[in-house]
Image (tube, grey):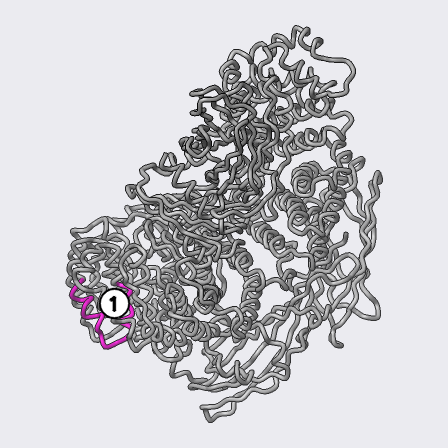
Amino acid sequence: MEWANQLCENRQFGSKMTDSKYFTTTKKGEIFELKAELNSDKKEKKKEAVKKVIASMTVGKDVSALFPDVVNCMQTDNLELKKLVYLYLMNYAKSQPDMAIMAVNTFVKDCEDANPLIRALAVRTMGCIRVDKITEYLCEPLRKCLKDEDPYVRKTAAVCVAKLHDINAQLVEDQGFLDTLKDLISDSNPMVVANAVAALSEIAESHPNSNLLDLNPQSINKLLTALNECTEWGQIFILDCLANYTPRDDRESQSICERVTPRLSHANSAVVLSAVKVLMKFMEMLPKDLDYYSTLLKKLAPPLVTLLSAEPELQYVALRNINLIVQKRPEILKHEMKVFFVKYNDPIYVKLEKLDIMIRLASQANIAQVLAELKEYATEVDVDFVRKAVRAIGRCAIKVEQSAERCVSTLLDLIQTKVNYVVQEAIVVIKDIFRKYPNKYESVIATLCENLDSLDEPEARAAMIWIVGEYAERIDNADELLESFLEGFHDESTQVQLQLLTAIVKLFLKKPTETQELVQQVLSLATQDSDNPDLRDRGYIYWRLLSTDPVAAKEVVLAEKPLISEETDLIEPTLLEELICHIGTLASVYHKPPSAFVEGSRGVMHKRLPARTGSGESTESPDVGAAGGSAPEAAPSIIPSQGDLLGDLLNLDMAPPTTSGPPPPSTGMQMGGMDLLGGGLDSLMGDESEPLGGDIGGSPAMGAGFGAAPAVMPASLNAPVGGGLGDLFDLGGVGMPMGAYIPPKIVWLPAMKAKGLEISGTFARRAGVIQMELILTNKAMSVMTDFAIQFNRNSFGLAPAGPLQVLTPLGPNQTIEVSLPLSTVGPVMKMDPLNNLQVAVKNNIDVFYFSCQYPISMLFVEDGKMERQVFLATWKDIPNDNESQFQIKDCHLNSDAASSKLQGSNIFTIAKRTVEGQDMLYMSIKLSNGIWVLAELRVQAGNPNYTISLKCRAPEVSQCVFQCYEAVLKN
Amino acid sequence: MIHSLFLVNSSGDIFLEKHWKSVVSRSVCDYFFEAQERASEPENVPPVIPTPHHYLISVLRHRIYFVAVIQSEVPPLFVIEFLHRVVDTFQDYFGVCTEAAIKDNVVVVYELLEEMLDNGFPLATESNILKELIKPPTILRTVVNTITGSTNVGEQLPTGQLSVVPWRRTGVKYTNNEAYFDVVEEIDAIIDKSGSTITAEIQGVIDACVKLTGMPDLTLSFMNPRLLDDVSFHPCVRFKRWEAERILSFIPPDGNFRLLSYHVSSQNLVAIPVYVKHNITFREGSSQGRFELTLGPKQTMGKGVEAVLVSSQLPRGVLNTNLNPTQGTYTFDPVTKLLSWDVGKINPQKLPSLKGSMSLQAGASKPDENPTINIQFKIQQSALSGLKVNRLDMYGEKYKPFKGIKYMTKAGKFQIATR
């Protein structure tokens, strides 16, 4: 009330007659006093009293007690008094529904007043009174007003239908107001048209499936005509409505674009952005070689640039939208980099957005300028901004290869400043640069190591530890460095602990001699003293790996890592398409589809860009169409934050070896507990003269330490060769939760054809090794010996990795099972069908030939899990012609079961989302010869038929892959 | 559409609320206050704030936050533009848009807001129309109203509301018919330490004050319309004619309005009117720093540079300064570290300079930040881009109006980096 007192003072001092007088309070009850005044006979006093009531209302005082007295003032010829009473009614009718009925009569009377202003005012106010009893009375006056001769009344009535719909949707439908509203779209007055469109759009939002705005070329023409003549707000409504229309062909779409383009020069930025939306959407349909297409592209840039000179709030919204536009059509703004340079006094939210767009636009042509700017920003005062600027430098390095060197030297300069948070950010991004350009910039490691002590943020510490572990062989005192971190192991965050564990294991594998104690220490810290299951599990995995098979451990832990993708935060293409259709809306500001956050709009139709018709593509297989129907629900997770990258890094450490190298030596597997490490170490250290096995085994610490692990080990030891490794992966959650699909054995070579030798078999992939599992039966009378096997050249270069191990002679009626490891490095020749394999088997009797078909799934390698961003980029990249669709019938798995089943066969689910009961699974597969296959599997609950779309650069494998899907899912 | 509006003053009190649909509790503003607390500066409050059930879209004008509450998908720019319109209308009606002015006229404010939005849809936002519906308060009218009991609400349907020229009211009459146009250009530039231009762009506007009787139809042509390739027009401008002939043809609104705004960004077109020579150094281990600054005119087309004001945020480590200006006055605020130097006019014969030393915290390491120098200035009678009006003609009315055109250039965000 301070200000109220102050206002009172003002009044005393000045002779100014202002509304503040309505705020004065008297000692007697204020309400009492007002009541008396409201019931006064003098009109003037009444009006003053109502004004006082309104004034109290505006500041949130409860004056509802005066309801009957105020309503009594409604019957008046004084327009101002009437308006004031209406204001009051709108505010309090809800709390006094019975009293509000009193007002109905006046409303109905006012709706027939001679003055259109009063008619409109009455119908407008009535719609704002949210009392069911009143709305019933509203229908008749509203019907009249919708057909009023005065357009001002009609346009007010149009909005009133939307209000009424909000209160009682059923009533509006029953009364046929929706049809009347639709008729108003053809009204002669543009303002009426605009309001009718606005009202219909609002109603349509809560009515997703009604075709309220059933647009056809005629109505579009009407709208386009009204567009030129109505107010700026009306233009926004009309443009937003136009954006929902799908033109029949490119010619229609061009003519709409032509008529919308002038709106780009409007002073109202909302009009401009709505026009941009319409153009961005309809452009999609224009053939790219059309002159008009490039003209349009050129016309889009200036208005977007102009938006950036507006007030900061407008800039912010504009920038969020430009961020989308730049991803969709980078060519529009590629020459406008400079307008995104940050100004010193921009608000922080504008600065951060500009920075983001700068990186998106960065290219070889402008990188020098961008870097100079970024370096400048890195010395500013605002910490958040500086951090983001440093990250941006790293992202530039990853995006524009030619600039990487300059970026690294810029980062080094920044590290020299010794500003704590700058150094930490720089280290985090340098880690990414190492990942992107291995073996190029490692010379800077020394500089990084100097700053070890100043790192106090988990992310930076983890990044630094990763670097030390990864390049342990180049850092002389790597063990000391890591040991220093180990001292406070339990105070570190999980991120750092996990990284430290991995780094020390890497170090151990690289320099086994000096670091046994260290690895011992970290393993026991991780497995025995930690409550964190992730850490414990990882500790055990490493432990077992090291103790069972150090060679395999080396392959696992030091596996070659896939390069990180260029753009880490691209919006998924299908989401981007949808967001482009929502330019200018909240969805575009949050970069989420409206269904993900707008209340009451669940089940809204997902908008998608129209397909280009001019280029003669079949409408059936546009890639956007296939995926575009999906509205990712958990969309934000698609855009990984920088932080996720590190998570990926850690996971990568766990990934199985990329190549299906030699199977782990079975001898190593059979060794007993204590000796395990010793034996392994020998093989690791090769030419080390002094065998260490004994030493280690003898060390009591070692004994105790490793003694803990074998308790669980026998199970894996008993498993078939390689199975042990599989189990290990299993524990890590990377491997095969259900086991790969192995087709049942079938007879390949009947005894009839092979002089008594029957061969049946199948193919399997076990722990990354392809195996041909054969059953040889001797149905002849004589003993068979000297078995050998050979393959003809085949599509994927399959070849036996060793001789056929049939050591003992095969007696009559004897059967032997052998498994033959296969490699994929043999000679290649394309076969038909693709997975056909011609085999020759020789024994002491003769040479026999047969051919069999292998399931292509055994060529799916274990590191076939693509990163999401890479997946998005690749999906977009592969031409639509390479997409094929298949149906899988009668499959009764739910999507989770299907996904884990497929994972068993190295078909990895990368993302899943659910749209209207339909699950969409995005999956990736990598074949042993490096071919990637991307898949989208759609599973509808309750429908046994799945739809699968496959995209691959070598489309001929699609058919085989589909067969695998079918086989895996049905078994 | 727009659900509610809250006005919040700089101390965080809600001093006005208006609801167009059902009432939204003012507790929704708590989310706004949280964001406000987090922001380091008042202008850093993000313009769009999500809450569990609503979205808050706000603008900060005249130290008042205008917070709009929306519930469904509404284009945020639409809301922001509307809020700007509210601010403009208040300013138009009350002369200033301050908390005191709004409170003094709270009933008019309420009537205006009710007239501007219906059910969240904009209804009448043109000041010409609003003024016919609700008369602006003038001291005279308030006095007369109190005595005679008449009202400031118009009884008639505003004429412009539905006409083809909704921006102009009918029946306008003036004894002196006059039309003034101001071409105002603001130059935004970032100059690097060596004096070369990193970016430079010009934001230009043509503001008009037209007081003409009847329904005049004006055309305005330029000497060099090629400059204008990125323009936004007032709705009154006939776009077709501009496309075809590069002539502005329009029936103007009555009174003050912005005819067009434009943007010139191609670097070669933007002349930089002033230069700055600077030498700001800190030495490691020394508690003294040197500060030297000299200003001079560059490409000003022979016009004088006036009202020059230099400001710079010095590093936190600077305790105080001891500088000598050759002209004007300078101040340094040791708390905010803001240096400002009111130079006045630049005399090309005797360039203004500011030289001296800065004292730093003893023993502290040398500051990392590099001060940015902001410059404000004005150049009268010249538009930096070279834009020139060729002629202004009037059709449709018989009288001869008085016409005037004025040019001005001023600095917008004109910044010089020193390192």
| SS majority, magenta | helix
Report whether residue A7 is seen.
no
> What residue type is disc 1 on?
Leu
Magenta stretch: give its range: A139-160
Work out which residue is located at the far bottom of the displayed protein and give it: B398
| Identity of the residue drawn at 38% across and 83% down | B171
Q: Which residue in the protein does label 1 denote?
A: A181
- Closest to the observer, A130 or A447: A447
Q: Quadrant of the N terminus of chain B?
A: bottom left
Count of labels shown?
1
Q: Going by the image, does A568 lie left or right of A187?
A: right
- Above or below, comparing residue A506 to residue B42 in the picture: above
A146 part of magenta stretch: yes
Q: Residue at x 72, y 53 (%)?
A: A372
For disc 1, the neighbor class at 10 Å (few under 14, some 14 to 19, many from 20) is: many
Residue A553, image x and y in percent? Answer: 62, 24
Give percent across and percent down for residue B275. 77, 64
Is residue B404 visible to the viewer in this orientation of the structure? yes
Q: Name the one closer to the observer, A701 or A162.
A: A701
The stretch drawn in magenta includes residue A696: no
Parent chain of label 1: A
> SS class of the residue under badge 1?
helix
Please name whichever residue, A764 or B309, is drawn nearer the observer in this view of the structure. A764
Image coordinates for residue A62, horizontal then vertical, percent: 29, 47
Location of residue A590 in the rendering, given as x and y in whole percent from the top left corner: 47, 50
For this view, does A162 lie left or right of residue A133?
A: right
Left or right: residue A668 versus residue B342 is: left
